Amino acid sequence: MIVFAEILRTISISVLVITSPFYLRHLEKEKKQRKLSAFEFTMYITIQIAFILLSISLLLFVFFV
């Protein structure tokens, strides 16, 4: 059961990492055309912070584990 949960977690992270850049790109195009709504702006900032945190965690994992 734990292996199944780990597989699901890995798949979900993979899907998020693959789809997030596409949505971020969409938001950047929309930002050039019009002002983003509050939700869109929140998603725009959240995705950028998530990518920064993912990079930091990968660097820590590679160099310290």
Image: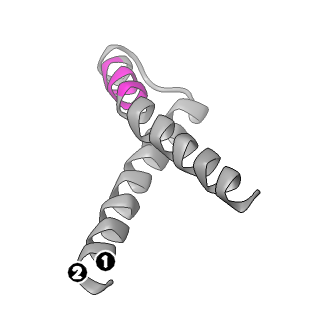
| Amino acid carrying mark 2 in the image | Phe
Task: Give me the residue at 43% from left, 34% from top.
Answer: 20
Task: Give me the residue at 33% from left, 83% from top.
Answer: 65
Task: Give me the residue at 68% from left, 50% from top.
Answer: 4
Say whether marks 2 and 1 touch (CB < 8 Å). Answer: yes
| Amino acid carrying mark 1 in the image | Leu
Does 15 lie within the magenta span?
A: no
Q: Is residue 33 above or below residue 1?
A: above
Identify the image quadrant of residue 32: top left
Is 28 left or right of 2, judged from the image as shown?
left
Q: Position of residue 24 (x, y in %)?
A: 38, 31
Is 12 left or right of 1, judged from the image as shown?
left
Identify the image quadrant of residue 34: top left
Give the secondary structure at mark 2. Answer: helix
Which region of the structure is painted magenta? Answer: 22-29
**Residue receiving disc 2:** 63
**Residue receiving disc 1:** 60
Does 28 lie within the magenta span?
A: yes
